[in-house]
Image (cartoon, rainbow, N blue to C red):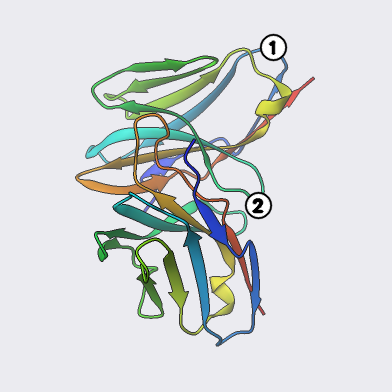
């Protein structure tokens, strides 16, 4: 039962361009969404989050957009840097539970 | 950013042996979580622990698993009789804050042979 899906296993972009990572969810009870960045053999590192009452949240180069009607969110990274190369996980929580449901992850490669 | 520290970083154990994974030190937090990631797969929720009790657990968290906060700061995950399929990265996480979301530890890589 994949409640959170990241359909693109990988993405490659040129340094300086925009990276767009996508995430879809099925559970309408989710009310909080997060993006994490992960390197091999390390724990997920929090990037940015968004509440279901908002449709956009911005933090520096990172912007998350939420489309509730489509049950879709995306992470935009502008401009992309080689240091952004990592696996990006979308996660969701809701319904008075703190547990996170993760997507499968998207491997981002930013080429110099 | 507040840190979540896990020990050991890597544990190799024989099938059937007990292992204890530790999340140290934690203070002033009420909610703790354990997640795992099997190689190449997504991060999966195992259990949440609130005020010294399990508040929620997944179907993965069967009778072979237990969690404790034995001394008020350390938070442990015990696997009583390890199986090959328990091999994974295990992550401890502390409760949510506005600036840092749920903060994860660096993980313990468990290898069952």
Identify whether A7 is placed above or below A59.
below
Q: CA distance from mark 2 to mark 1?
A: 27 Å
User: In which chain is the residue bearing label 2?
Assistant: A
- Is B64 placed above or below B32 here? below
- Could you tell me how many numbered marks the image carries? 2
Front residue (pair B51, B42): B51
- Coordinates of residue A33 in the picture (x, y in percent): 36, 33
Residue B99 locus on image (x, y percent): 40, 29
Residue position for label 2: A41
Q: Residue at x 63, y 61 (%)?
A: B9
- Vertical side of A81 occupied by B103: above or below: below
- In depth, the one of B76 and A82 nearer the eye is B76
Dot 2 and dot 1 residues touching (CB under 8 Å): no
Classify residue A102 by image quadrant.
Answer: top left
Q: Quadrant of the C terminus of chain A?
A: top right
Q: Residue at x 36, y 16 (%)?
A: A56
Residue that label 1 marks: A16
- Badge 2 crowding class, 10 Å Cα cut-off, few under 14, some 14 to 19, many 20 or more, is some
| Image position, residue A48 (x, y; %) | 44, 27
Q: Residue at x 54, y 72 (%)?
A: B86
Element on which disc 1 rests: loop
**Circle nearer the viewer, 2 or 1:** 2
A59 over A51 or under it: above or below: above
Q: Earlier in the sequence, mark 2 or mark 1?
A: 1
Residue B100 x/y as whole percent: 42, 34
């Amino acid at each position: 039962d994949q409640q959170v899906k990241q359909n693109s296993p990988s993405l490659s972009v040129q340094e300086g361009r925009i990276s767009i990572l996508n995430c879809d969810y099925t559970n309408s009870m989710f009310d909080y969404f997060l993006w994490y960045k992960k390197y091999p053999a390390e724990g997920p590192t929090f990037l940015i989050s968004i509440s279901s009452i908002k449709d956009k949240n911005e933090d520096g180069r990172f912007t998350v957009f939420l489309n509730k009607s489509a049950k879709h969110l995306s992470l935009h990274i502008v401009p992309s840097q080689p240091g952004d190369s990592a696996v990006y996980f979308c996660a969701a929580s809701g319904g008075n539970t703190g547990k996170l449901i993760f997507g499968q992850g998207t491997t981002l490669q930013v080429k110099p | 950013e507040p840190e979540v520290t896990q020990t050991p970083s890597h544990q190799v154990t024989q099938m059937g042996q007990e292992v204890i994974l530790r999340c140290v030190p934690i203070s002033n937090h009420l909610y703790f979580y354990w997640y795992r990631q099997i190689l190449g797969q997504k991060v999966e929720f195992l259990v949440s622990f609130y005020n010294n009790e399990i508040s929620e657990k997944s179907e993965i968290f069967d009778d072979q698993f237990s969690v404790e906060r034995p001394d008020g700061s350390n938070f442990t995950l015990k696997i009583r009789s390890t199986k090959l399929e328990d091999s994974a990265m295990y992550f401890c996480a502390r409760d949510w804050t506005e600036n840092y979301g749920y903060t994860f530890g660096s993980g313990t890589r468990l290898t069952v042979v």
